[in-house]
Image: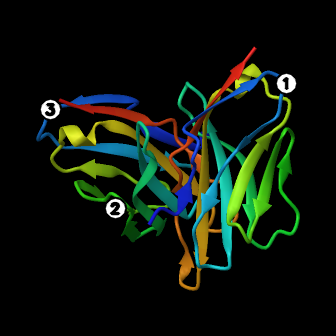
Amino acid sequence: NAGVTQTPKFQVLKTGQSMTLQCAQDMNHEYMSWYRQDPGMGLRLIHYSVGAGITDQGEVPNGYNVSRSTTEDFPLRLLSAAPSQTSVYFCASSSGGGPYEQYFGPGTRLTVT
Amino acid sequence: AQKITQTQPGMFVQEKEAVTLDCTYDTSDQSYGLFWYKQPSSGEMIFLIYQGSYDEQNATEGRYSLNFQKARKSANLVISASQLGDSAMYFCAMREARFSGNTPLVFGKGTRLSVIA
């Protein structure tokens, strides 16, 4: 049981490049979310999904795309990387929207130069 | 409007002492959940404790307890008998339950706790 996995752990991009951050969970969780963490800002929600085929925007969705074709995977795509997207990205999942613990992946540290 | 407010950017506590980390929240929903997470310097997010809005008793998990004051909309985390390993960032978070379904977890900006020997 791997829980929530994220790849890569570290990534450096040049401005304008695109890439996909991968997230997978093996707990059959319905809810999956992407957050970014910046110093002094806490975790801010980028996008989330309540099930396969359903996604919605969070607080800071601009510059990011998501899709949820399977229950297990929830990739985050950066369309054209900008220095403002330098951050640590966390993927999380939970079995429902109620009083359920949200499990976090280990994070991806992204630097855009 | 900010839904979760943690007013203490940093806190210091002596080892073996108790410490309270403040959290206030804003919601018009009757049904919601409040969570606390710990983030050590290694970066992972560790779930600590949960309190439901309809729970009559304050939640406790080992040395962690949640001082839930619904009328004041506060959900403070109390750590008893602090240990050096408690030094970390602590995040308060809320999930609202709406008629249309539940909403994602929203986090506060965090409090950095430093435990001094």
Q: Quadrant of residue B68?
A: bottom right
* Three-letter code for the amino acid on which mark 2 is drawn: Ser
Q: Chain of mark 3?
A: A
Q: Chain of mark 2?
A: A
Percent of width and height locating residue B38: 64, 38
Alpha carbon separation for disc pair 3 and 1 = 48 Å
Which of the two marks, 3 or 1, is nearer to us in this view?
1
**The N terminus of chain B lies in which quarter of the figure?**
bottom left
Decide if residue B68 is on the left or right side of residue A37. Answer: right
Is there one chain holding both mark 3 and mark 1? no
Extreme-top residue of the structure: B117
Percent of width and height locating residue B19: 77, 36
Instruction: Report crowding for label 1: few under 14, some 14 to 19, many 20 or more residues within 10 A (C-alpha).
Output: some
Q: Residue at x 17, y 42 (%)?
A: A82
Q: Where residue A67 is drawn, which disc sits there? A: 2
Q: Residue at x 66, y 70 (%)?
A: B32
Which of the two marks, 2 or 1, is nearer to us in this view?
1
On screen, B28 above or below A66? below
Is there one chain holding both mark 2 and mark 1? no
